[in-house]
Every structure is written in structure tokens, then in C-alpha cells.
Image (cartoon, rainbow, N blue to C red):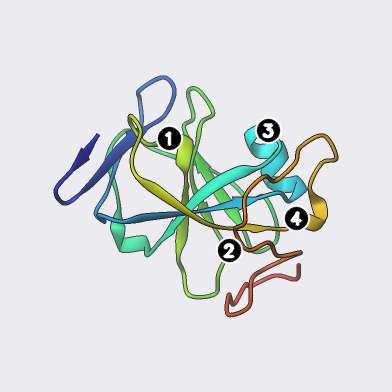
């Protein structure tokens, strides 16, 4: 649900609920193998934000260390990924777009790790495409 001061979301079973205290949402499609495996699709769409903009309103999250620097927080009951850490050195987090309630207004801004894209999916828009991290993103691990 979208309100005047943010957006709500949660996991598949409803045990975990969150609120994002931010009006404008931007999304990035990631084609890396890790995101594909974690989300079970050709890519995952993440909405990056400052950590203080994400508020867990009910439930608890379990942690999976998906790489040396990155971790994913998920619902321990249904397994829905709710929060991704380690994509930037500044402590920002990302929320998988599919976990938001309804159809929030997410503006896609780019495609990352397109070098890892599966052959059976075609990117059909004119958004910027990057083989790894976009310029200006300070990641904490090598591409």
C-alpha cells in the first residue's frame, strides 16, 4: 500500500511486514547469478535505499550470508527475501520490488550485471545497461 509518506510490504505468508519511509522508489534490475538463484527468475528488481528508510513493523528476519560481504534477510517461515545488504560500501540496503504491497510506482533506472544475463531473456527497453556495478557505485566486493 502506498501512502503520503511511504510504502508497505511483506513476505508471502504475512508473518513479516515492513514499511519504507520514502515516497519515490527507484528500481534496478540485476542479472547476476546470485540474484537469479535467490529470486528464481531471469533477474531480480531491487529498490535501493538508506537503511534508516526501512522499518520492520512485524515479524523477524533470518540472515543468510550470500557472499563474503553480502547478506540477505528473509522470512524464516516462508523464505521470502525481504532485505539485501552489501551492495554498496555506504550501508545502503535494497528491498526486492516484488515484496511491496499492490503496485507501487517504481521507476526503473538501469540494468546491472548484464554480462551474466541468461540467453532466453531479452532486455527490451532503452535504460542504461552495465556489465557489473554502474559507475559511482562503491561496492564492497569485486564484480
Q: Quadrant of the rendered structure where residue 26 is?
A: bottom left
Residue 124 x %, y %: 67, 45
Number of other residues with Cα within 10 Å of mark 3, as a class: few under 14, some 14 to 19, many 20 or more: few
Q: Is residue 49 above or below residue 74?
A: below
Q: Which residue is mark 3?
A: 41
The answer to whether residue 74 of the structure is visible from this angle is: yes
Q: Compare residues 17 and 22 and report the one nearer the observer.
A: 22
How far apart, in angstroms, are the residues tagged by discs 4 and 2?
16 Å
Badge 4 element: helix
Q: Nearer the viewer, residue 99 or 82?
A: 99
Say whether residue 90 is left or right of residue 53: right
> Looking at the figure, which quarter contains the C terminus?
bottom right
Q: Quadrant of the N terminus?
A: top left
User: How far apart are the two marked residues, 3 and 1, measured between alpha carbons?
Assistant: 15 Å
> Mark 2 and mark 4 in contact (Cβ < 8 Å)?
no
Residue at coordinates 62% horizontally, 72% vertically from top-left?
139
How far across and down, in percent of the image, does residue 92 sit?
45, 65
> Which numbered circle lies on residue 99?
1
Q: Is residue 133 left or right of residue 91?
A: right
Q: Secondary structure at mark 2?
A: loop
Task: Say which element carries label 3.
Answer: loop
Residue bearing the label numbered 4 = 114
* C-alpha separation, residue under disc 4 versus residue under disc 1: 23 Å
Helix, strand or loop at mark 1? helix
Do callouts 4 and 3 mark residues in contact (Cβ within 8 Å)?
no
Tell whether label 2 touches label 3 (CB within 8 Å): no
Q: Earlier in the sequence, mark 2 or mark 1?
A: 2
Residue at image position (47%, 35%) is 98
**Mark earlier in primary sequence (3, 1):** 3
Amino acid at each position: 500500500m502506498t501512502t503520503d509518506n511511504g510504502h508497505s510490504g511483506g513476505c508471502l505468508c504475512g508473518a513479516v511486514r515492513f514499511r519504507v519511509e520514502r515516497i519515490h522508489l527507484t528500481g534496478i534490475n540485476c542479472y547476476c547469478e546470485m540474484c537469479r538463484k535467490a529470486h528464481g527468475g531471469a533477474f531480480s528488481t531491487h529498490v535501493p535505499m538508506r537503511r534508516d528508510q526501512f522499518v520492520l513493523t512485524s515479524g523477524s528476519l533470518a540472515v543468510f550470508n550470500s557472499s563474503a560481504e553480502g547478506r540477505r534477510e528473509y522470512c524464516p517461515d516462508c523464505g521470502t527475501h525481504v532485505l539485501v545488504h552489501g551492495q554498496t560500501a555506504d550501508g545502503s540496503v535494497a528491498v526486492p520490488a516484488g515484496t511491496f504491497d499492490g503496485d507501487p510506482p517504481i521507476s526503473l533506472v538501469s540494468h546491472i550485471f548484464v554480462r551474466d544475463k541468461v540467453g532466453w531473456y531479452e532486455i527490451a527497453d532503452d535504460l542504461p545497461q552495465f556489465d557489473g556495478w554502474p559507475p559511482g557505485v562503491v561496492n564492497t566486493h569485486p564484480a
